[in-house]
Amino acid sequence: MRRFLKYPLGMVAGLVALFALGVLWPSATAPLPDAADSRLIRNARIIDVERAIAGEPTDVLIEGGTISRIGYGLRAAPDLPVLEADGRYLLPGFWDMHTHAFKLSPQLHLPLAIANGITGTRDLMDCPGNDDTLIACVADKRHWTRAAIEGRMVSPRFVEVASFYFERADMTPGQAARLAADYRARGLDALKVYNRLSPATYKRLTDEARLWGMPVVGHLPKAVSLDNAVAAGQRSFEHGHVFARHCFRDAAAWRSGALDAEVPTALVERMVTHYDAAACARAFAQMREAGTSFVPTHVTREEDARARDPAFTGDPRLAFLDPLSRWAYRDDLKSTVVRYPAARGEAALRGYFEHGLALTHAAYRAGVPVLVGTDTAIGGFRYHDEMALLVRAGLSPAEVLRAATLDAAHYAGQTQHHGRVAVGNAADLVMLEANPLDDIAHTRGLYAVLLAGRLYDRPRLDALLDFTRAQARSPVNATKLVWGFSASSVNGEL
């Protein structure tokens, strides 16, 4: 018997050893940009995102990662690197205003962001404690930002880092206040609220945050009205659900839980067919006066609406996802199909998605700041999809470009150094083959990306795509993800 047992036990021991080796194996490093942070860009057409115009070809001098001069025929030192634009279009780097970073994001997500022209990212979920095996913590994100600026790694700048979400329905106001103080002490920029928070706890949290000058961001808790949340000072609202759930005739009943027993398909239909335009008009006016931003992440609702579409579920860009994330992505789509069954469920979700686009258009026209965010697994690619959906919603390409750059910098209070191609601004730039003011799809045609003046030319961008695709297939990364998820303090919540 012992002889027979030793073989399976040996196999188990071997597998454990291999797993441990994968967890401890050093992570790969993405291909770095050109080391120089000073260079001359010649003959670029600068996109003025404020005035929505493309200028005549001109030169841009970058010194120490900052734009120092703009003008045709600039002279520079003979040994200064030169990027020939040949009439291509130059504009500020894009900011993704709803992302989530993980410990393995330097291998799986951050290079994909840079490869798609995203030079700034707003992280909406920090780790819940001082460290975590799965979720990247604020210290990681600060380090990655510094390293990217110095050319030592590939990453966008992290322009805002929000806390792990306040979600527990049984959390008392005092518990929330103590946890918020801990997050503030750890150096978080914002506090994130979620769906199940009680009105009393939400109020205590927003009161504390106002005293500290710390923004509250995230979801609109179900039991809190949008009017009250804006009045309480919530700085941003995420996802296209916000207006659909607030601006329908039975919104108060939904918030109270009186509609919880309703079939999900019927509830979504009710939110669309019982639309209350007056309620939305009041909310829009209140948000405009308060300067409250809206990040609709329409790509997430598109995932619901197209959960049965083979062209969508078989998106070849899913090859850039690791196996665990790909499984989770497709599992979410399958869950949506089960929750909203048959042709009626599919039609309801498509109608809800289109309704969300229309509400975003109405909000923007009413003066609500709309920002571009993804909150999805292949966020780098999907960022361009989100910009296209905002145009489909009724914004012009110029308005979407402004939302992706200057308006994002305004939200973060960083317009002094970001959001424009201007003297004194950081040289975080994208260069496009064609004019995006003519067609928003032209944002996909990247010729070059610069972060703090350091150049990712087209071959380097292609190398980042190759790197990310290879890392998504890496058994080492799969092992690290499984370990990170299983050992994380919040795996049950995720």
Image: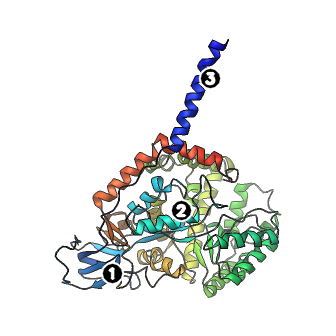
Contact? badges 2 and 1 (CB < 8 Å):
no
Residue 225, above or below 352: below
Give how far apart the Cα atoms at labels 2 and 1 are. Answer: 28 Å
The mark total stands at 3
* Residue 431 visible to an observer of this rendering: yes
Furthest toward the left, the residue is 78
Nearest-to-viewer mark from 1 and 3: 3
Residue at 23% x, 74% y: name it: 87
79 or 299, which lies in front? 79
Left of 209 or right of it: where is 417?
Answer: left
Q: Residue at x 29, y 60 (%)?
A: 458
Task: Answer left or right for 408 relative to 466.
Answer: right
Q: Residue 142: percent from the left, percent from the top?
A: 52, 68
Q: Are marks 1 and 3 in contact (CB under 8 Å)?
A: no
Q: Secondary structure at mark 2?
A: helix
SS of the residue at dot 3?
Answer: helix
Mark 1, secondary structure of its residue? strand
Looking at the picture, which amino acid does disc 2 mark?
Answer: Asp
Mark 1 → mark 3, Cα distance in angstroms:
63 Å
For label 2, the residue is 140
Q: Is 346 rendered above or below residue 400?
A: above
Above-or-below relation of 59 to 121: below
Q: Position of residue 228 (x, y in %)?
A: 74, 79
Give how far across and how far down residue 258 sits, in percent: 83, 63
At label 1, the amino acid type is: Ile
Amino acid type, callout 3: Leu
Q: Earlier in the sequence, mark 3 or mark 2?
A: 3
Callout 3: 10 Å neighbours few (<14), some, many (20+)? few
Q: Is residue 374 visible?
A: no
Residue 67: mark: 1
Residue denoted by label 3:
9
